[in-house]
Amino acid sequence: MTTTSRVWKLGADVDTDALAPGGYMKNGIDVIAQHCLEALRPDFATSVQPGDVLVAGHNFGIGSSREQAAGALVHLGVRAVIAPSFSGLFFRNAFNLGLLLLTCPEAEQLHEGDRVALVPAGVQRANDTVLPCKPIPDFLMDMVHAGGLMNVLKQRNQGERHE
């Protein structure tokens, strides 16, 4: 059976300050995550469930290079972010921390509360239609499956020691 995820819908141009508000950056990720998206969705951090997905418009993750923006989503258990485009720095930080980003030109067709399945071809909606996403290179999917770049490197290092 395919796992489905609940959609949380956001608009375009969601910046890193909304994801990891600057006023909390002196704290650890557990505190930062409690304030994730509070300026846009005050209920998000207290209501999001592990496995839920964010769907947004163009330019998700614009702004600063703070990796805590992606880290807060990982800490809250967000399974993936689906958007037509991402900031380059956010894209790199997200995969480095094991957060799946799906570049989906038709993402805005998804609605708040929809149930979707992440399938190899893209995002499958409840009516079985699939919104296509750009393919993700294997090395990035390895990082997602391992929980981030550091875990990939640890696994490689352990493999080298046992040979």
Image: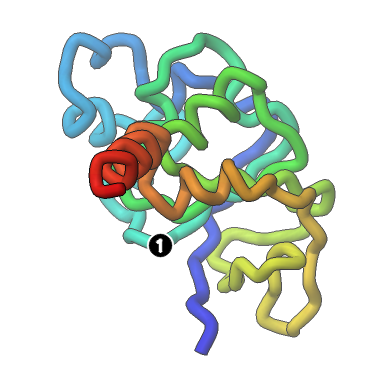
Q: Residue furthest bottom?
A: 1
Q: In the picture provided, is 26 more to the left or to the right than 114?
A: left
Q: Is residue 74 visible?
A: no
Q: Is residue 144 visible?
A: yes
Q: Residue furthest front?
A: 163
Q: Position of residue 51 (x, y in %)?
A: 40, 62
Amino acid identity at mark 1: Gly
In the rendered image of this protein, does residue 51 appear above or below residue 96?
below
| Viewer-side residue, 86 vs 11 | 86
| Viewer-side residue, 47 vs 127 | 127
Q: Position of residue 37 (x, y in %)?
A: 41, 33
**Image point 67% across, 30% down: which residue?**
86
Q: How many numbered marks are there?
A: 1
**Image point 49% across, 20% down: which residue?**
16
Q: Which residue is mark 1?
A: 51
In the rendered image of this protein, does residue 127 appear above or below residue 162?
below
Q: In the picture provided, is 3 more to the left or to the right than 36?
A: right
**Image point 64% across, 42% down: which residue?**
56
Q: In the picture provided, is 98 more to the left or to the right than 139?
A: left
Helix, strand or loop at label 1? It is loop
Q: Residues within 10 Å of mark 1 (few under 14, many from 20)?
A: some
In the rendered image of this protein, does residue 44 appear above or below residue 61?
below
**Rendered image coloring scheme:** rainbow
Q: Position of residue 89 (x, y in %)?
A: 58, 18
**Image point 73% across, 63% down: which residue?**
122
Q: Residue 7 sits in which quadrant?
A: bottom right
Q: Residue 119 sits in which quadrant?
A: bottom right
Q: Position of residue 8 (x, y in %)?
A: 52, 54
